[in-house]
Amino acid sequence: MDKALAGVKIIECCNLVAGPYCTKLLADLGAETVKIEEPGAGDEARKWGPFPKDVPHPERSGLFLFLNTNKLGITLNLKNRKGREILASLVKESDILVEDYPPRQAKALGLDYEVLSKLNPKLAMCSITPFGQTGPYRDYKSYCLNTLHAGGEGYLVPAGNDYLDRPPTKVGNFFADFSCGLIAAIGMLAALYRANSTGLAQYIDVSKQEASMFYQRWGVVRYANENLIISRATEGYWFGGIMPCKDGFIVLWCVQPQEWERLRRLMGNPAWTEEEKFKEFGSVILHGEEANAYILEWLVNYTAEELYHMGQEAGVPFGMVRTAEDLVKSEQMKAREFFVPIEHPAVGAIEYPTAPYKLSENPWHVDRPAPRLGEHNKEVYCKRLGYSKGQLVRLRAMGII
Amino acid sequence: MNVLEGIRVADFTHAFAGPTGTLILALMGAEVIKIESAAHSDVASRDPQHARAMENVGIFHCTNLNKLSIRLNLKRHEAVGLAKRLVSICDIVVENFRPGVMDKLGLGYSALKEVKPDIIMLSLSSHGASGPERGYRAYAAQMGPLSGLSYITGHRDGPPAPIRSTADTLAGVTAVFPILAAMNYRQRTGKGQFIDCSAIEALSICASDILMDYTMNERVRCRDGNRHDFVAPHNCYPCKGKDKWISIVISTEEEWKAFCDTIGNPGWTKDKKFKDGLTRWDNQEDLDRLIGEWTRNFTSYEVMRTLQKAGVAAIPSFTNEELVKDPHCKERGIFAEVNQPHVGEQIQMGLPWKLSNAPKVPIRPVPLMGEHNAYVFGKLLRMSKEEIEKLEKEEVIW
């Protein structure tokens, strides 16, 4: 099978979600990715769940297993001078280096573009940090929850007037980090494409704040261009939205007048829709609350599944509010093979989400599950860098690997 | 030379998600030609007849920067012929009609591959180009709930929360990744390909840990405010002013000590309820209340500066106003002024990364509809002025 990124060599020095997701995207398309972890502890994600049966184990974190498919894993202590020398020799023969340490710490660990690009003049290096490499906040700390708020999305969730006295809530668990990792991966592919056509090294400074703001690119500039401050209160739906039904929740949202016409027909043209204010869609949206109250009376007779398919068949855009279970069991996801089983020595075969795209020439494929801590030390240090087995033992004794 | 200089894109996208994807290509220096027509109106468009016109125009303005625009009425088969001629001199085609529409128009991948064998074509749709729900309609409002993300977002005692415009932008950004992967593949092998991209799946993948909890443990995770599995405090706290909040996460003992020192070690910080991470998590409601009593005396910026100085992750829940005015954003050069047709000076944002060794592409205004007819049909496709005028009269170039 042809791999889109066959022959591309990546070094990853990252923890948790954003950086590892960036290189996972590349590794899943065939880039040979070496993940460098701290000896002993390893990637922080190994401590984070979910774990099978909720029993924590560094080789069984669902988060880590998902984020590190198709990677080789080695341990290397970058706090040690010899460790940094080894890093430099790995970088010399790689195309891409991705790291996510705070700017000051990165340099101390040898993750320094000025130095490394001299060793490898074609290197594309990416640093992923909370606020980028410059500016007054460059050394600020930010966990995923903070990043969501740094980019402006956090302030808007949950949309609507119902919980304004309570704090805004997060999106999913790691939404901000996944979406930043995606942006970094795109930046890397752009740099790689350019490096291949020009032979020039590239340094890519990815700020998680800017990545998050990119997703809010319309909302953010509305202040500058319309003098409008958006908030949970302004972001609520003016018609439809997420509404209760017989067995859960359904979402209804119309944009085009004909969608409202179809909804009227689907509900059996009830008398209330004959009222002047509900005749035209343009007027319905001005009386959204009233319309919703009527629609709700009809919705509660049906299950979410019924409404979803019945609506869609009639051209009315209903959506189900799916749980993880609904998604895994959905006929659509099954038909698209969105989940595939992957076998891992420490956890057996488990279904993993795959990818949100399908390349006709380069099908998504897992050749190897996430690495166990230091699993590929021998392969990388001995085969690639030429260390002997004896030297490997001594490096281990010295706490370097 | 820009990253994608010399790369030409035929952009059949409309609304919000698709144009966000081609925007990134345009901002990287590709020549993106947007195909529009007076014959079919776009949801997010220049069309002021639409419901909430200004919003739609705002979306159009932030997603179609740096693009060229031509008019082609694809309901006419002469226009389809011209579209094919255009594709024959393009590298990439991006479209977000409902699955099957491009095929019906005679512009499906197999037809385009005939005129340009190494074409890279991406179809972006809500549900994807296959499966029983192929062709179902969904806007951002439906995509969040269908992806599984809404169910795990919001208050524990409240309904699932919508994922608003982010659903669209995430879908658009997601589409760029496989396009660039295919570009790298074509650079090496000379082969093009077809890419099927689903917006709902783009959102679902961001909930992978929660999906894995189901496939591992059959656990259906529900929304739970800002709660983290084992870190506390992990929440947003009220600050001075109306609807002002600061997000604070304290994950290590070192951070906890720095936090207590910074707020002056009030008596409650020594309570054994809060002596370690385990007990802080168990007593997080009390802890959240006490932290909130401290934060509400200050502005969110004051809390950020004080706590960050001590090494504690505290970031305000920035409003769009704060971001536009923020000194860090200013120094990073996130915003640029651009003179947009009909509306004048605007502030817009460029690419979310900085490349050291490539010139920054200046942000250019959105095109007028058909602004580049002469360049594309005349110069690129070498059509005569008379021929173009004739097709304009016949409502083909329309």
Image (cartoon, rainbow, N blue to C red):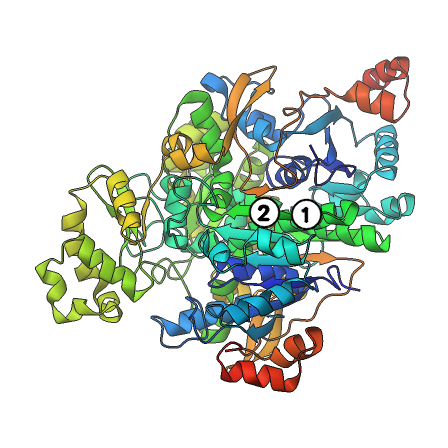
Direction from residue A155 to residue A236 in the image, left or right: left
Q: What residue type is labelled 2?
A: Ile
Horizontal placement of A91 versus A174: left or right? right
Cα separation, mark 1 vs mark 2, equals 9 Å
Hey, which residue is sitting farthest left in the picture? A271
User: Is B48 placed above or below A268 here?
Assistant: below
Q: Could you tell me the amino acid type at mark 1?
A: Ala
Q: Where is residue A50 in the image (x, y as percent from the top left)?
A: 49, 26
Relative to A178, is A47 above or below? above
| Residue A292 visible, this angle | no
Residue B201: x and y in percent read: 48, 42
Task: Using the rendered image, report if marks 1 and 2 lie on a common chain.
Answer: yes
Q: How crowded is mark 1: few (under 14 residues within 10 Å), some or many (20 or more)?
A: many
> Viewed as shown, does residue A161 lie left or right of A73?
left
Q: Can residue A360 be seen in this view?
A: yes
Q: Residue at label 1?
A: B182
- Please name whichever residue, A263 or B277, is drawn nearer the observer in this view of the structure: A263
Q: Which of B198 and A25 is in front in this view?
A: B198
Element under disc 1: helix
The chain holding disc 1 is B
Q: Which mark is residue B195?
A: 2
Which residue is painted at 37% across and 29% down in the image?
A: B220
- A382 to the left or right of A240: right
Q: Answer with the quarter of the image where residue A9 lies.
A: top right
* Quarter location, residue B336: bottom right
Above-or-below relation of A260 to B282: below
